[in-house]
Amino acid sequence: MKAKEIINLAYKGRRNIMTPKVLGYGKISETLAYEISQGTGLNHEVIYGVTFVRLNKDGSVVPEYDLSKMCWSKKEVKKYIQDVRRSQC
């Protein structure tokens, strides 16, 4: 299953109020997908969101709230995804 499909199973197309603009999707593994999104912070600065969802063997999905994070730059997003990839392997 593609990353976007896993995310959509969990959130059914609903957008995050703080980071509504989806920039892309990816996967850490066959069962762990992420979405990168962008929005505007409370002080009108650009912020990014990284949302993780796990696909279970039975086809159900579970949002991984403990892995999901807000970031201040694309560089921070990239590093965070790399860190999650290392920790999940």
Image (cartoon, grey):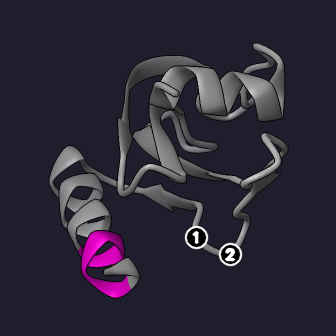
Residue at image coords 51%, 16%: 21
Task: Measuring from the top left, give residue 53's x and y in whole percent.
Answer: 65, 50
Task: Measuring from the top left, give residue 72's x and y in whole percent.
Answer: 35, 55
Q: Is 42 placed above or below 3 here? A: below
- Of the 4 image quadrants, the one containing the C terminus is bottom left
Q: Is 70 placed above or below 15 here? A: below
Residue at image coords 59%, 31%: 19
Q: Give amino acid for label 1.
A: Leu
Residue at image coords 64%, 32%: 7
Residue at image coords 44%, 42%: 47
Left or right relative to 27: residue 17: right
Pointer 2: what residue? 66
Q: Nearer the viewer, residue 3 or 70?
A: 3
**Quarter of the figure with residue 36:** top left
Pointer 1: what residue? 67
Answer whether residue 80 is magenta in the image: no
Left or right relative to 87: residue 31: right
Left or right relative to 58: residue 47: left
Q: Main secondary structure of the magenta part?
A: helix
Answer whether residue 84 is magenta in the image: yes
Q: Nearer the viewer, residue 73 or 85?
A: 85
Q: Give amino acid for label 2.
A: Asp
Give the structural element (helix, strand or loop) at label 1: loop
Task: Measuring from the top left, give residue 32's x and y in whole percent.
Answer: 51, 55
Q: Is 23 placed above or below 59 here? A: above
Answer yes or no: do the residues labelled 2 and 1 have beta carbons within 8 Å?
Answer: yes
Q: Nearer the viewer, residue 24 or 85?
A: 85
Task: Measuring from the top left, give residue 40's x and y in whole percent.
Answer: 53, 31
**Mark 1 neighbour density, 10 Å: few (under 14) some (14–19) many (20 or more):** some
Range of magenta residues: 83-87
